Amino acid sequence: MAGFLDRAKEQAQQALQQGKQKVDEVQAQRAGNELLKRLGAAYYAEQRGKGSGQATQDALNALEAHIAVHGDGFLRS
């Protein structure tokens, strides 16, 4: 009986870990999408004469930093 309970506990922990990993992936994807949106908005504002090149560069740098840590998978979805 103890072996069964140990196995059930191990499987539950694995499922919990997989769930946490999926949540982290979704959060990273949402953050990447938000950074991409900010870059687009900064570029648009710059092109319309209402923004600055520095704001666009800052948005690009933030996006590149995110990609360096989390990858660029959010760009394909």
Image (spheres, rainbow, N blue to C red):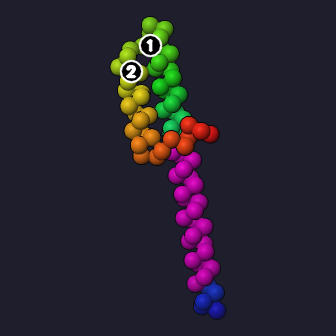
Answer yes or no: is residue 29 visible.
Answer: no
Q: Residue 32, how many percent across, how many down? A: 51, 38
CA gap between label 2 and label 1 equals 8 Å
Q: Quadrant of the N terminus?
A: bottom right
* Residue farthest toward the bottom in the current orientation of the protein: 1
* Residue farthest toward the top in the current orientation of the protein: 49
Residue drawn at 51 percent across, 41 percent down: 72
Residue drawn at 54 percent across, 64 percent down: 17
Residue drawn at 50 percent across, 15 percent down: 44
Query: Where on the picture, by quarter, is residue 49?
Result: top left
Q: Residue 41, how many percent across, how many down? A: 50, 21
Marks 1 and 2: in contact by CB < 8 Å? yes
Q: Which residue is mark 1?
A: 46
> Would you call the spot at circle 2 few (<14 residues within 10 Å), some (14-19), or many (20 or more)?
some
Q: Which mark is residue 24?
A: none
Q: Residue 3, how many percent across, how many down? A: 60, 89
Q: Which residue is mark 2?
A: 55
Task: Please check the rendered image and state whether residue 67 is part of the magenta-colored stretch, yes or no.
Answer: no
Magenta segment boundaries in residue numbering: 6-29
Q: Residue 59, how many percent across, how many down? A: 42, 27
Is the residue 35 above or below the residue 10 in the image? above
Mark 2 or mark 1, earlier in chain: 1
Q: What kind of residue is marked 1?
A: Glu
Is the residue 3 above or below the residue 36 in the image? below
Please name the predominant secondary structure of the magenta segment in the image.
Answer: helix
Is the residue 50 above or below the residue 3 in the image? above
Q: Quadrant of the C terminus?
A: top right
Answer yes or no: is residue 73 visible.
Answer: yes
> Would you call the spot at circle 1 few (<14 residues within 10 Å), some (14-19), or many (20 or more)?
some
Q: What kind of residue is marked 2?
A: Ala
